[in-house]
Structure formats: structure tokens, C-alpha cells
């Protein structure tokens, strides 16, 4: 902290080293876009209301209270500030350094002072100003001992009225009370307070309670409670090994379900809504396919999209659908732990809000998964803060059941007390999502998650990999046409087995069931009966049951007995009875079938419609090519290009660092150019330059002489005391008219400081 101080905030910014200026631009990124011309414009931009509100939203309760105390006390020294804040001196010093680094306050030769617009920005509604509810001190405040003496002399009704005014925001109306009366002549409590100057009259029949009186009423502090004591987290003991094992199980399930989801959508992609989201029916079907509830399915879909594994593209018919990207194939080739890290890293950085899926917006419309507007600017911060607080828990400690999450919400609301209003919901979603993804378990972080969240991905992968069971390469066939996988199957083996058999139950041991439909599904993709037998025999550690062998042979025997061609389409079979059965089936009446030969039927139904309808009737047809050969082909696996924002994710941090360095360089160049420019009595300014000069005058608290062009084009000079600059207008006290007036900034041609105003 400087011991000499600076004339303006711009002067202080010029004195900062590049590293400190870079931290300011990183903490307040709105100041860097577009790059300021010099430090004066940077200081002007830092004082705008919109930028101040963004900066205040990232302050803790301690930092807000220190800034509020600075507004109440006014320009003061750090030691004097520490005396009025109900916190330890070390906490106040640390908070003040943070405020200076954020350019919310600056150092003058007389002490530290906040930016002029901070007082208004701290007010969040209602009449109560700031955080403490205290108003600024009087321009010439009375001695604290004198204020306490006058408070002690008050009658009980007057003290009760003063307490009420303090708790109501420090402002009241006088009613019929006389403003000029001696203490001994006061007839009412209000007159008693006015006579002792504990309430000060303002215009319009209102009175305010000066800041020094409020501080004295609170024992010399701005608040009644300590502001540097965050709420405690409710915890309970739990073994870390148990947490790690439970988390690893959830992590494995999350990876496996994302793989199943995208595998299924690669063959049967759901339609994309015109708004860009996923339909409610498709989400329910996905939940059924994955054997999870709809909120869990929504989370998995959103995480897959955030990781760049899912995108929209046109299907062969030209309709927009949700399909895996080309990055999905690379992702599936990685180990399970590596795939989990990719998913969690994307989830941590994603502003998406899966917790809203299924609820309704203020207009009553249902929030759809993958909808473009389903995101929030504070979601990433809430998620990160919740996990960082969990990381601070001692090893073996987890959030207590029932009270743990509410205490976590209270701590985060202490760290970010201003916004958003939905902070409690966001924290709850973050904890639930982290549990589903295996980041936390049983209310505490897994050991491998600690490594990931601290940036050591290699350690995280190794830690999770050690907890995961080894993939198995076999199944145990049962006589009831089922196969039991005694553990997680290898990825490629699981995919092949899901083609030949249906998953009946999932868990530690997955059960697959062979059916005629599942075997026919494999034959439809080009497998022969011999290949099905060889595959089943190669993956089983037990002998192949005879019923399963018969099932494959019987399905293969009927497979292809009916052949479909173009007539619009034709059906040909060596078995006349098979065609007769189809022709006489009542459900085939709409297919337009007629017999043209004992072994040939023709149909007026197109082939792409006829083929699935025949399969619904129980037939197992195959397509016959023009030369009479059987045409069997696996359905095309659809892929989309990986979205641009998911390519090269690792370079984004380096790009932001380079952009910040570029802005710092531009500011320094502007400062050098300004210092080398010859001084002139009055220099024409652009609107942005006028705003910068005026805000500098506001912070310095001095008068300026402005050149102004009125509506008739007449130029004049006005001596004014600037009050605020917002919305392209200057509000200032005009010395000529002795009134507060508004000036259009674009009509101000020159701004010159005046050291001694008349």
C-alpha cells in the first residue's frame, strides 16, 4: 500500500506494475473489452455503474462490509478503518488490499477512499443504504465522545425512536416537529433528537441519521455482529476408503451410461427440436434405455454435449438430429479413468443447468434438455465454490446428512452474498450432480477428485484407475438363455454382446438375455449363424447350453426365408406356406400384397416401409439385390463434427493470458503517448475522453471548467462540480445558475481541472 497516495485513480493505475494491472483485468474482464486507450479510460470504465455491480457481485461479506464502512466513514486511513469494522485487523487489511486490487477504492494523500459511485451501487433495494444500513458521516462529524454523551442524555422514547430510525435505513420524516429548538424546549422525541443534532434535516421534510451517530449506537462499529466469521459446515466422520469406493462406482456408471447413450444415438438418433433442444419424449425414452430417472438422463446428455461428444447434424433425410461427434470414437478408445476426467472437466466448465430440465420457466414453458437458453452465468461459480469448500474438509470428514448441504449453502452465500437469488438451488444441483458423476460420494470428495480439482489430472487418473475393477473378457452362460457378466466388460466386447443379446439387468453383474429378436438383430447387421456361434463360444467360460444353440440355429433357419425386392416391392420365398401366412395375416391388409406366382408376392408399399412392417409381423426378411444376391448391411453409424468450441480446449487459458497481456501493452502505450503530448490550455475531447476526464474529476472531488455547445450551437464555458456520469449525461452543480443541471457528454468539447473554484 502506498504511503504517499495519488491525485486520481488513473494516476494510481499508472503506477501499478504490469502483473498487478493484469490481475485487475482478469478479475474484472469487462474492463478489457475493448482495450482501453490509456489508464485514464481504464479508470473511467472502472467507475461505471454496470462494471461496479459486476465487481461487487464477486465480493465476500467481509469485503462488502469493509467497503461499506469505507463509504460510511469517507476518506480515512487503514488503521482508522480497522477500528470501525467488527473484524480482526488482519481480516480488514486483507479485505482492503482486495478492494484496492479491484480498483473499487484508491489511495489519496489523505487516506483511502472508495469510488464515488460505490455508495449507490451497494444499495440493493429499499431505503436502507449499503450493507450496514448506515449513511455517510457528516462533512464535519462530531467527536465520538460527544456523540455518546448526547446519546446518554436521551429520554427513553427518544432513544426508542432513534433505534427505529437506525433499523429503518437512517431516514425518516419530521411531521410537525420543529427543526430549530433547544434541547430543554423539546416537546416530542423527534424534537429532542433534532435539538441534539442526532437527526439532521434534509430537504423535503426528511431527516437522516448521520453515520457517526449510527456507529456510536453500535458500540463504535458499523455492524452489530462480526463480519469475518463464516458459517461453519455441518460435518460427520466417514472413512475415506468407503468414500473412494462409492465414488469410483458412480464414476464408472457415469462413463458406461454415457457410452451406452451415444452408442444408441449413433444408430437411432433423436430429433432435434426447432429450438435446438431435446424433446421430452426422447428424454424419457433415453432414461428408460439407460435404466435411470429423467433428471439423471438429462445430466448425462448435457455432460456429453459439454464434452464435445454430442452435437446436431442432418440425418440422411436432411432432418436435424442429435448424434455423437467424431470425438466420441477417440473418447471410447481411452481408459475408463481418462474418459471420466474428460467428462468431469467439461462439467466443471459448463454453464449449463441440467437441474432445470423438466421444470417450467416463468412463462410456463417446460425446460428441455440441450435447449440453448438453459445456462446461467453463475452456475460455474456455484459449482466450483461448492467443490472447493468440500475439498477443504479434513480427510475422513463429509457433510452431515440432512444439515450438511444447507450449511454449505450458508457458507457460499456468505462468500457471495449479493447474487444470484437461486444460489441455494445451484449449490444443491452441484452437489447432486457431483455425486452422480462420482466426484463426491456420501457427502465428501473422493481422493482422486481432490487431485483433479487441484489440476493434477495424471494423479486423478491413476487414483481412479486403481479403484476400478479390471475389465473382464468373458461371460457365464446359463441354461435359461442368459449370460452373466461377472464384472465390467471390455468396451468392444460389451458392444458386440449388446448386439446379440438384450440387457436384462445392470449392476455389479450385468445380465444379458438371448432372444430370437436379439439374434435376428445380429443377423440383420451381416453376421452369419457360424459367426454368432463362434462369438458366443469364445466369450463364455461355461459350455454353451443346448437351448442357446437351438435358438441361434432356428432363428438363422427362418432368417432370409422371405426376400424383399422392388415392384414397388416384391416378396420371394421357396416356402409357399411362409408367403401364404403373410398374405392371410389381417395386419398385412394395408401392405398392398398380391400373389403373382406360388413363391412370389408383390406389394405397392415402398421397400423402406415394407421391411420394418414385415418384421413387426414376425417375419425375418432380407433384402435381395437386383442380381438375386442377399443384401445385408449394418445400419450406418452417424457422426457429427466436433463443435468448434470443444476443439483445443487446452489453449483457451493461454489465449486469455495473451489477450490480457495485449491489453496491458495497449494501456502502457497510451500512457506513454499521453505523457509525451505537449500541454495545451484546452484540448478537444471525444465523448469517451470527456467521460474519462469527468469521472477523474468526480473521484478527485474538484471543480472543472467545461466547454459546452448548446442546442443552438452556441459555445460557452461552464464552471461545474461533477456529481455523476451515466448514460451519456453529466449531472453536475453549475456555479453560474447555482443549481444541479444535466449536460450531454457528446456536447462537451473541453474539460479543464480548476484547483481553486470561486
Image: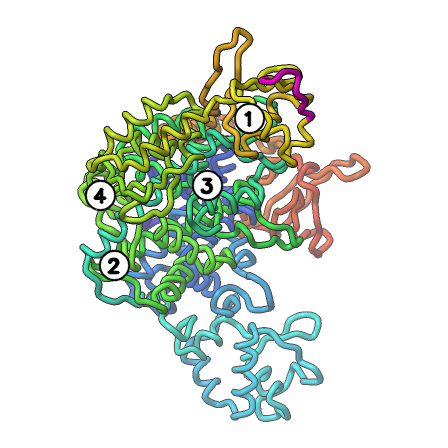
Residue 313 placement, left or right of 507: right
Reading the image, the residue beneath label 2 is 393
Residue 666 in the image: state x and y as whole percent: 44, 27
Against 402, residue 636 (above or below) is above
For the residue labelled by badge 1, is the local secondary structure a helix, a strand or a loop? helix
Question: CA–CA distance between discs 2 and 3?
Answer: 31 Å
- By secondary structure, the bulk of the magenta-drawn segment is best described as strand
Which comes before the other along the chain, label 2 or label 3?
Answer: 3
Q: Residue 577, labelled with which disc? A: 1
The reply to whether the magenta stretch includes residue 597 is yes
Residue 168 in the image: state x and y as whole percent: 57, 75
Which comes before the other along the chain, label 2 or label 1?
Answer: 2
Residue 473 in the image: state x and y as whole percent: 22, 34
Q: Residue 468, labelled with which disc? A: 4
The reply to whether the magenta stretch includes residue 503 is no
Question: CA–CA distance between discs 2 and 1?
Answer: 74 Å
For the residue labelled by badge 2, is the local secondary structure a helix, a strand or a loop? loop
Q: Residue 64, labelled with which disc? A: none
Residue 455 in the image: state x and y as whole percent: 27, 40
Which comes before the other along the chain, label 3 or label 1?
Answer: 3
Reading the image, the residue beneath label 3 is 301
Amino acid at each position: 500500500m502506498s504511503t504517499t497516495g495519488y491525485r486520481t485513480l488513473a494516476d494510481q493505475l499508472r503506477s501499478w506494475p504490469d502483473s498487478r494491472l493484469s490481475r485487475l483485468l482478469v478479475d474484472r474482464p469487462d474492463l478489457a473489452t475493448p482495450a482501453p486507450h490509456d489508464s485514464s479510460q481504464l479508470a473511467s470504465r472502472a467507475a461505471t455503474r454496470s462494471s461496479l455491480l459486476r465487481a461487487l457481485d464477486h465480493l465476500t461479506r467481509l469485503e462488502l462490509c469493509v467497503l461499506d464502512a469505507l463509504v460510511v466513514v469517507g476518506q480515512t486511513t487503514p488503521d482508522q478503518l480497522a477500528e470501525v469494522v467488527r473484524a480482526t485487523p488482519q481480516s480488514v487489511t486483507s479485505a482492503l488490499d482486495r478492494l484496492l486490487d479491484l480498483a473499487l477504492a484508491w489511495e489519496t494523500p489523505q487516506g483511502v477512499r472508495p469510488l464515488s459511485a460505490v455508495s449507490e451501487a451497494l444499495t440493493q433495494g429499499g431505503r436502507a443504504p449499503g450493507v450496514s444500513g448506515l449513511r455517510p458521516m457528516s462533512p464535519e462529524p462530531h467527536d465520538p465522545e460527544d456523540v455518546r454523551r448526547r446519546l446518554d442524555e436521551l429520554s427513553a422514547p427518544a432513544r426508542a425512536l432513534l433505534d427505529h430510525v437506525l433499523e429503518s435505513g437512517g431516514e425518516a420524516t419530521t411531521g410537525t416537529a420543529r427543526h430549530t429548538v433547544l434541547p430543554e424546549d423539546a416537546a416530542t422525541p423527534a424534537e429532542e433528537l433534532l435539538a441534539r443534532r442526532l437527526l439532521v434535516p434534509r430537504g423535503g421534510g426528511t431527516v437522516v441519521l448521520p453515520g457517526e451517530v449510527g456507529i456510536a449506537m453500535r458500540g463504535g462499529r458499523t455492524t452489530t455482529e462480526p463480519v469475518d466469521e463464516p458459517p461453519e459446515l455441518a460435518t460427520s466422520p466417514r472413512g475415506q476408503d468407503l468414500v473412494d469406493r462409492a465414488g469410483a462406482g458412480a464414476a464408472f456408471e457415469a462413463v458406461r451410461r454415457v457410452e451406452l447413450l451415444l452408442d444408441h444415438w449413433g444408430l437411432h438418433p433423436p430429433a432435434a427440436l426447432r429450438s435446438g433442444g431435446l424433446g421430452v419424449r426422447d428424454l424419457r425414452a433415453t432414461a428408460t434405455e439407460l435404466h435411470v430417472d429423467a433428471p439423471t438422463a438429462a445430466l448425462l446428455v448435457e455432460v456429453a454435449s459439454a464434452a464435445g461428444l454430442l452435437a446436431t447434424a442432418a440425418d440422411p433425410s436432411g432432418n436435424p438430429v442429435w448424434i455423437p461427434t467424431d470425438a466420441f470414437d477417440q473418447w471410447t478408445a481411452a481408459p475408463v479413468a481418462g474418459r471420466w476426467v474428460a467428462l468431469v472437466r467439461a462439467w466443471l466448465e459448463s454453464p449449463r443447468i441440467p437441474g432445470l430440465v423438466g421444470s417450467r420457466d416463468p412463462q410456463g414453458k417446460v425446460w428441455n434438455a440441450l435447449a440453448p437458453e438453459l445456462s446461467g452465468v453463475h452456475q460455474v461459480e456455484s459449482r466450483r465454490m461448492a467443490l472447493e469448500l468440500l475439498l477443504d474438509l479434513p480427510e475422513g470428514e463429509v457433510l452431515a446428512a440432512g444439515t450438511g448441504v444447507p450449511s454449505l449453502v450458508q457458507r457460499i452465500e456468505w462468500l457471495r452474498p449479493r447474487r444470484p437469488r437461486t444460489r441455494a438451488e445451484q449449490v444443491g444441483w452441484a452437489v447432486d450432480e457431483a455425486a452422480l458423476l462420482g466426484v463426491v460420494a456420501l457427502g465428501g470428495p473422493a481422493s482422486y477428485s481432490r487431485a483433479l480439482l487441484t489440476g493434477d489430472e495424471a494423479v486423478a487418473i491413476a487414483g481412479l484407475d486403481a479403484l476400478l475393477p479390471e475389465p473382464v473378457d468373458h461371460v457365464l452362460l446359463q441354461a435359461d438363455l442368459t449370460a452373466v457378466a461377472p464384472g465390467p466388460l471390455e468396451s468392444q466386447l460389451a458392444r458386440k454382446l449388446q448386439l446379440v443379446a438384450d440387457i436384462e439387468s445392470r449392476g455389479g453383474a450385468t445380465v444379458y438375455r438371448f432372444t430370437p429378436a436379439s439374434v435376428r438383430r445380429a443377423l440383420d447387421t451381416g453376421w452369419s449363424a457360424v459367426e454368432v456361434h463362434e462369438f458366443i463360444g469364445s466369450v463364455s467360460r461355461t459350455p454353451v447350453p443346448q437351448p442357446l444353440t437351438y435358438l441361434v440355429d432356428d432363428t438363422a433357419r427362418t432368417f432370409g426365408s422371405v426376400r424383399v425386392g422392388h415392384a414397388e416391392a416384391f416378396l420371394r420365398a421357396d416356402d409357399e406356406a411362409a408367403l401364404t401366412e403373410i398374405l392371410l395375416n389381417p395386419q398385412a391388409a394395408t401392405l398392398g400384397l398380391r400373389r403373382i406366382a406360388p413363391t412370389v408376392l408383390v406389394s405397392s408399399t415402398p421397400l423402406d416401409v415394407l421391411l420394418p412392417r414385415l418384421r413387426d409381423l414376425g417375419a425375418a426378411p432380407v433384402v435381395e439385390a437386383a442380381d438375386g444376391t442377399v443384401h445385408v448391411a449394418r445400419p450406418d453409424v452417424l457422426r457429427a463434427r466436433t463443435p468448434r468450441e470443444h476443439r483445443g480446449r487446452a489453449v483457451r487459458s493461454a489465449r486469455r493470458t495473451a489477450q490480457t497481456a495485449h491489453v496491458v501493452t495497449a494501456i502502457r502505450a497510451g500512457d506513454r503517448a499521453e505523457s509525451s503530448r505537449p500541454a495545451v490550455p484546452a484540448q478537444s475531447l471525444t465523448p469517451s475522453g470527456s467521460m474519462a476526464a469527468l469521472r477523474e474529476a468526480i473521484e478527485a472531488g474538484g471543480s472543472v471548467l467545461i466547454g459546452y455547445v448548446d442546442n443552438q450551437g452556441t459555445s460557452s464555458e461552464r464552471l461545474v462540480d461533477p456529481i455523476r456520469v451515466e448514460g451519456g449525461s453529466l449531472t453536475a452543480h453549475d456555479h453560474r445558475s447555482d443549481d444541479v443541471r444535466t449536460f450531454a457528454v457528446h456536447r462537451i468539447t473541453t474539460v479543464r481541472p480548476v484547483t481553486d473554484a470561486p
